[in-house]
Amino acid sequence: MVRAIDLVINLLAAVAVISLLVAPALGDDALKRELVEQASEVKPPVLARYQELDLMHKQILITLQTLPENQITTTTRKWVNLASGQGGILLKFDEINDLASKGDPQSHETALTQATQLKGDIGTLEGYNQAKDNFITIYPRMALTHFFTDQGVYFEELAENENDTRLSINYYEQALVAYREAEDLTKTTYVDLKVKELMSEYRFDMEVANESFCVGETNFDQAISGLNNSTNLITIVTGILSARTSERELTTAYELYTKHGDKQASQIDEMLVTVDNAHTELVAVFLRYAAVIGALFLAILIIALDRIFRWTHAVEDTLLGNEVIG
């Protein structure tokens, strides 16, 4: 009887052990189907743009389908979610690609920032052996390099076609970030040198332009003051000289601001027109003064010559009279 009870107990224990062994397998099989279905449903448009990501997506499915059920664990769920789940690498890549597909540079800058942050997710994915051993982590790295290279080209072309030097420098700096992230040493070196040269040239030109503008503006005010005080000959002469100096200095500033696409060039252009008109009017006023002064001088000269002539004639008459008397 005791043996029979022991036998029953042993049978029950064996059934329990078998149940424990079978239950995880059934659970793992269900998890496997769930993860395969989840990964299959994730087909963002970015897969068509980057072949690397399409290969990554296919490799995830192949890995899940070929892994034995007993190797499908909660850890598997974590890396699959990180790679292709909601908020995962593939969908984040899709958001980045959507931003980079827009025409405005600001969207591309945002995409570049988000792509740099995505490196952290890829680094985390590389910490999962199943993903790494099945080469799943290789593809997003390749896609990210591809993306950074594309953005480097985009910003470099923007910089080369931009008239505003400040914007051009900013675009070159964004291109530099992109090429550096893409680990393109040749492009990184070239763009870095381009940024330094352009910044040096811009700073030098702006120092000259700003100094010329200050001098030109001061003389501009003096020229206008001379025009507003046209009854004072000294003020008029000072205004004419100031107008010439202002025109020369403002022209220098205008050329440099125009060279670098600075909006201040339009303001200076208006000032040049004004000071040129002021110079013309001041010269006209000066000529009128000169004409009056010349006429007065000529009248005085004629009177003086007439008096000299009369005096000379009188002297001659006196000398002649003396000769007759003698």
Image: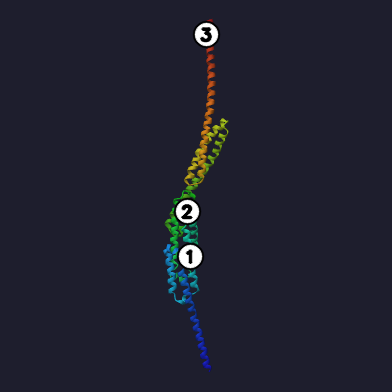
Of 58 and 317, which appears nearest the observer? 58
Which residue, given by chain and number where applicable, does mark 3 sit on? Answer: 320
| Residue type, label 2 | Tyr
Mark earlier in primary sequence (3, 2) = 2
Identify the residue at horizontal 54%, vertical 40% (top origin).
217
| Residue type, label 1 | Leu
Mark earlier in primary sequence (2, 1) = 1
Identify the residue at horizontal 52%, vertical 37% (top origin).
275
The secondary structure type at the circle numbered 2 is helix
Task: Say if residue 94 shows up in the picture.
Answer: yes
| Residue type, label 3 | Leu
Kindly report which numbered mark, 3 or 2, lies closer to the viewer in this rendering: 2
Query: Colour scheme of this structure image?
Result: rainbow
Query: x, y percentage for residue 186?
Result: 42, 56
Q: For the residue carrying disc 3, how many other residues have a C-alpha within 10 Å: few (<14), some (14-19), or many (20+)? A: few
How far apart are the two marked residues, 2 and 1, measured between alpha carbons? Answer: 27 Å
Tell me the tag on residue 91. 1
5 up-or-down from 39: above or below? below
Kindly report which numbered mark, 3 or 1, lies closer to the viewer in this rendering: 1
The quadrant where residue 232 appears:
top right
Q: For the residue carrying disc 2, how many other residues have a C-alpha within 10 Å: few (<14), some (14-19), or many (20+)? A: many
Kindly report which numbered mark, 2 or 1, lies closer to the viewer in this rendering: 1
Of 40 and 173, which appears nearest the observer? 40
Which residue, given by chain and number where applicable, does mark 2 sit on? Answer: 171
265 up-or-down from 105: above or below? above
Mark earlier in primary sequence (3, 1) = 1
Identify the residue at horizontal 53%, vertical 7% (top origin).
321
How far apart are the two marked residues, 3 and 2, measured between alpha carbons? Answer: 99 Å
Task: Say if residue 326 shows up in the picture.
Answer: no
